Image (tube, grey):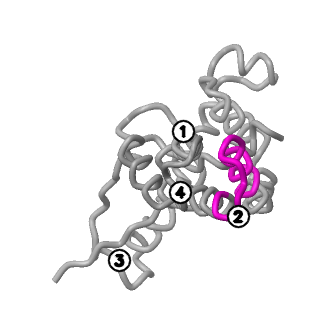
């Protein structure tokens, strides 16, 4: 018999299985999965829309899948709001943006709490990541008057904590929650 435990919060999964005080300690091995594939996800989500063949629905679906960035839970949340809007007769032309706004309203308290919990240097890192800016660049350090070494330590803390920032397969750090990234950009 085998069990699969899935979650999009690496810190929570690590806590469940790597903490000696937890009942699941040592009972699983981590397996990092890549983001949901965009084309396949669009097809699957589109098939669930109230009228998938209606004008603009495919484009709206592709927009929310793109906004979710392959994050399973955020894809479901955005798809839910898009479906709800389309089912109530909203025009597909602006349904994706409206679905994103509804989802952002829904998670804004959480995003605000995350933002307030971060130290200044961590906020700079998260804002840079949301904007696609290298988080330890000389220009960023200069703009904010923070030494690059301080930014590097902040990146390391955020990656180690694995609640908001992760590094996959040795790649660059990235925000785990695409809605947090959008919330930061829109603040």
Q: Would residue 153 be found to the left or right of residue 40 on screen?
A: right
Label 1, label 2: how far apart the Cα atoms are? 35 Å
Residue 29: image x %, image y %?
Answer: 27, 65
Residue 1: image x %, image y %?
Answer: 16, 83
Q: Which residue is mark 4?
A: 51
The segment highlighted magenta reads 86-103
Q: Look at the numbered disc 3 and give the secondary structure of its residue.
A: loop
Of the numbered discs 4 and 3, the one sitting upstream in the chain is 3
Of the numbered discs 2 and 4, the one sitting upstream in the chain is 4
Q: Nearer the viewer, residue 21 or 66?
A: 66
Label 3, label 1: how far apart the Cα atoms are? 28 Å
Residue 44: image x %, image y %?
Answer: 40, 54
Which secondary structure dominates the residues rendered in magenta? helix
Of the numbered discs 1 and 2, the one sitting upstream in the chain is 2
Label 1, label 4: how far apart the Cα atoms are? 35 Å
Q: Where is 181 relative to 23, above or below?
A: above
Q: Nearer the viewer, residue 138 or 43?
A: 43
Q: Nearer the viewer, mark 1 or mark 2?
A: 2
- Please say whether residue 71 is one of the residues in the magenta stretch: no
Q: Which residue is mark 1?
A: 174
Q: Does any portion of residue 158 appear in the rendered image?
A: no
> Could you say which disc has been placed on residue 88 in the image?
2
Q: Where is 73 relative to 182, above or below?
A: below
Q: Look at the numbered disc 4 and give the secondary structure of its residue.
A: loop
> Could you say which disc has been placed on residue 95 in the image?
none
Q: Look at the numbered disc 2 and give the secondary structure of its residue.
A: loop
- Label 1 with label 2: CB-CB less than 8 Å: no
Quarter of the image containing the C terminus? top right
Label 4, label 3: how far apart the Cα atoms are? 46 Å
């Amino acid at each position: 018999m085998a069990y699969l435990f899935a979650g999009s919060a690496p810190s929570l999964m690590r806590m469940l299985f790597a903490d000696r005080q937890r009942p699941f300690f040592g009972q699983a091995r981590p397996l990092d999965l890549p983001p949901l594939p965009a084309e396949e996800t669009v097809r699957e989500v589109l098939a669930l829309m109230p009228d998938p063949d209606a004008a603009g629905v495919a484009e709206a679906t592709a927009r929310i899948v793109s906004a979710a960035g392959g994050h399973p839970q955020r894809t479901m949340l955005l798809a839910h709001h898009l479906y709800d809007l389309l089912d109530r007769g909203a025009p597909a032309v602006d349904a994706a943006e409206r679905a994103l706004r509804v989802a952002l309203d829904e998670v804004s308290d959480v995003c605000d709490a995350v933002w307030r919990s971060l130290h200044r240097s961590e906020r700079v890192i998260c804002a840079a990541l949301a904007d696609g800016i290298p988080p330890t660049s000389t220009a960023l350090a200069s703009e904010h008057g923070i030494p690059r070494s301080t930014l590097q330590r902040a990146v390391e803390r955020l990656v180690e904590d694995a609640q908001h920032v992760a590094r996959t397969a040795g790649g660059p750090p990235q925000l785990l929650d695409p809605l947090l990234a959008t919330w930061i950009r829109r603040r």
